[in-house]
Image: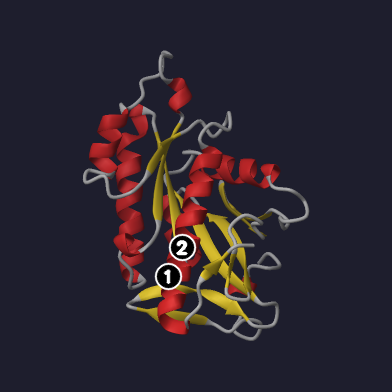
């Protein structure tokens, strides 16, 4: 087990999770005056989750980001790191600390997926635009909903952003799924915000990342305000 993996679930170092209306609350650390929010990048294997996280980690300054850690499994891996965003304000006296995670893409690691989802505050679903991967997108999105349900959650109770990756392949010899069709399969009611992206080129990565961070922090702040009278303030 990688050092640091346990820290989010270690009630000895943190106050534990608070619940409100069957929705997880971020972890509050009274020792460091921090609120820890967890964002998970979910989606089919080889869809671009890892590429997103590596690009985000590289773009963040050394002064705000933690080490990029990896749990390697046979043919797959889970990446994660912490960072302190400087432009998202604070909640009461507490600084906001965000942890970013990816899940393994392979179905056989579903237990790991569920472990990573435990305590999630926001989700980015990275869909693969390749026509040949259309079924994988639908299967993975259904798997996400099923895993959340097993953990007592509904996907519509969480901040979720969709990213349609590999759009740079449009016009190439590789068949890609039209955006309208991706929306029809994954977002028919236009409930979730979505972004076109090419994670390999960095296009759409920042926009997706900023959107999910803001949605997550606002959601956590709103729920903490109801429970504890805290509100989001400027940094």
Q: Are marks 1 and 2 in contact (CB under 8 Å)?
A: yes
- Which residue, given by chain and number where applicable, does mark 1 sit on? 222
Image coordinates for residue 88, horizontal then vertical, percent: 58, 58
Judge whether 196 appears above or below 99 on screen: above
Task: Give x and y (percent) for residue 146.
Answer: 30, 61
The quadrant in which residue 3 appears is bottom right
Query: In the image, 126: left or right of 59?
Result: left
Q: Residue at x 30, y 38 (%)?
A: 135
| Residue closer to the observer: 116 or 120 | 120
Relative vertical location of residue 204 with respect to residue 15 in this rendering, above or below:
above
**Could you tell me if residue 119 is visible in this image?**
no
Classify residue 171 by image quadrant.
Answer: top left
Q: Residue at 51%, 30% (x, y): give it.
A: 198
In the rendered view of the protein, which quadrant contains the N terminus?
bottom right
Tell me residue 210's x, y (percent): 53, 48
Residue at figure coordinates x 39%, y 31% from the top left: 129
Identify the residue position indicated by label 2 in the image: 218
Categorize mark 2 by other alpha carbons within 10 Å: few (<14), some (14-19), many (20+). Answer: some
Residue 184 in the image: state x and y as whole percent: 23, 38
Q: Along the line of sight, which residue is nearer the eye, 159 or 90?
A: 90
Would residue 71 be found to the left or right of residue 114 on screen? Answer: right
| 168 relative to 74 in the view: left or right | left
Look at the picture and state if 203 lies above or below 37: above
Color style of the picture: secondary structure
Which quadrant holds residue 167? top left
Q: Is residue 85 visible?
A: yes
Q: Residues within 10 Å of mark 1 (few under 14, many from 20)?
A: some
């Amino acid at each position: 087990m990688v050092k640091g993996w346990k820290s989010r679930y270690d009630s000895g170092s943190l106050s534990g999770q608070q619940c409100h209306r069957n929705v997880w609350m971020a972890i509050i650390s009274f020792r460091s005056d921090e609120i820890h929010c967890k964002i998970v990048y979910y989606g089919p294997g080889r869809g671009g989750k890892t590429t997103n996280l590596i690009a985000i980690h590289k773009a963040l300054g050394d002064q705000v980001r933690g080490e990029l850690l990896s749990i390697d499994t046979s043919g797959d891996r889970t990446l994660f790191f912490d960072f302190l965003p400087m432009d998202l304000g604070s909640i009461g006296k507490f600084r906001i600390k965000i942890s970013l995670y990816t899940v393994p893409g392979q179905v056989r690691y579903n237990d790991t997926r569920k472990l990573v989802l435990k305590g999630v505050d926001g989700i980015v679903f990275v869909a693969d635009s390749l026509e040949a991967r259309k079924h994988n997108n639908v299967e993975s999105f259904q798997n996400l909903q099923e895993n959340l349900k097993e953990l007592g959650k509904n996907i519509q109770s969480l901040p979720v952003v969709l990213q349609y990756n590999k759009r740079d392949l449009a016009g190439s010899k590789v068949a890609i799924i039209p955006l309208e069709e991706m929306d029809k399969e994954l977002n028919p009611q236009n409930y979730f915000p979505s972004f076109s992206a090419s994670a390999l080129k960095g296009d759409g990565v920042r926009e997706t990342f900023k959107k999910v961070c803001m949605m997550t922090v606002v959601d956590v702040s709103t729920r903490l305000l109801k429970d504890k009278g805290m509100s989001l303030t400027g940094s």
